[in-house]
Image (cartoon, rainbow, N blue to C red):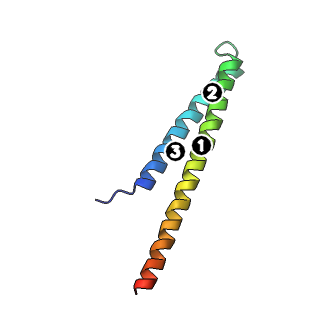
Amino acid sequence: MIIDYGILATTTLGFSLALTWNEASIKIIKYLYPNVGALSEALEYLIYTIIITCIIIIIVYLSNKFHESSFKLNDIKNTIIH
């Protein structure tokens, strides 16, 4: 069984991102209904979620760029060898 760690990492990061957005959504809903939450708590989670989103997007972008460059290098090696 071959495991593609790039896909595994991307899936894990996507799952983490979904959980943070879920938590931020809950906080925003609690803010919209004032009997349940506070603005500061909702803003904290929203800012946290935006930061996590940016970090994950950068990591996935860099991972894909690294993956692309390794494929190009392998194509060049195969062309030279054959």
Which residue corresponds to mark 3?
14
User: Which quarter of the image is occupied by the C terminus?
Assistant: bottom left
Q: Residue furthest top?
A: 35
Question: Which label sits in the foreground, 1 or 2?
Answer: 1
- The answer for how far apart the CA atoms under marks 2 and 3 are is 17 Å
Question: Which label sits in the foreground, 3 or 1?
Answer: 1
Q: Residue 41's x, y, as percent?
A: 65, 20
Question: Mark 1: which secondary structure?
Answer: helix
Q: Residue 27's x, y, as percent?
A: 63, 24
- The answer for how far apart the CA atoms under marks 1 and 2 are is 15 Å
User: Which quarter of the image is occupied by the N terminus?
Assistant: bottom left
Q: Earlier in the sequence, mark 1 or mark 2?
A: 2
Q: Residue 46's x, y, as percent?
A: 66, 30
Question: Mark 3: which secondary structure?
Answer: helix
Q: Residue at x 53, y 35 (%)?
A: 19
Q: Looking at the picture, does residue 6 appear above or below residue 16?
A: below
Which residue corresponds to mark 1?
55
* Residue 35 image-quadrant placement: top right
Disc sitting over residue 63 in the figure? none
Q: Residue at x 51, y 72 (%)?
A: 72
* Residue 40 image-quadrant placement: top right
Mark 3 is on which residue type? Gly
Mark 1 is on which residue type? Ile
